[in-house]
Amino acid sequence: LTRSQVIVFVADGKSPDIHLIEVASGQTARTLEGEGSGLAFSFSSDGRYLVGAGQGRVTIWEPATGRVVSTRRFASPNAAMFAPRGH
């Protein structure tokens, strides 16, 4: 994935995976394993990370590689976002 690509994420509810779709082509750029059944997702301002919350956990991915950076359990997370500076 490059910074010039416009990417959206799709969780279809049928599998726990998240599909990153390149808007211009409509093609799947990457599939992230995990939290597709989450309630909230957000990209960091620099596009380096995607955070998802739901199902008792918060997960941060690196979309460029598909790597899970961190997963933490919480009682009932229902929101996920990065601060404006990406922290």
Image (tube, rainbow, N blue to C red):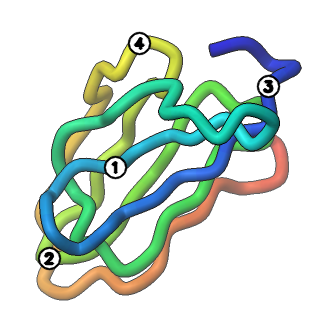
Q: What residue type is labelled 3?
A: Gln
Measured from the top left, where is residue 24 in percent x and y? 81, 36
Q: Which amino acid does label 2 sit on?
A: Gln
| Image quadrant in which you'd find residue 82 | bottom right
Q: Which amino acid does label 4 sit on?
A: Thr
Spatial separation of the CA atoms under disc 2 and disc 1: 14 Å
Q: Report the residue marked by disc 4.
A: 65
Picture residue at 74% right of the left edge, 43% below the top = 23
Spatial separation of the CA atoms under disc 4 and disc 1: 13 Å
Q: Report the residue marked by disc 3.
A: 5
**The C terminus lies in quadrant:** top right
Judged from the image, the secondary structure of the residue bearing numbered disc 3 is loop
Kindly check if marks 3 and 4 are in contact, taking CB atoms under 8 A apart as contact: no
Q: Earlier in the sequence, mark 2 or mark 1?
A: 1
Up-down: is 68 above or below 71? Answer: above
Spatial separation of the CA atoms under disc 3 and disc 2: 29 Å
- Which mark's residue is nearer the viewer, 2 or 1? 1
Measured from the top left, where is residue 63 in percent x and y? 48, 27
Q: Which amino acid does label 1 sit on?
A: Ile
- Which mark's residue is nearer the viewer, 4 or 1? 1
Q: Report the residue marked by disc 2.
A: 55
Q: Report the residue marked by disc 1.
A: 18
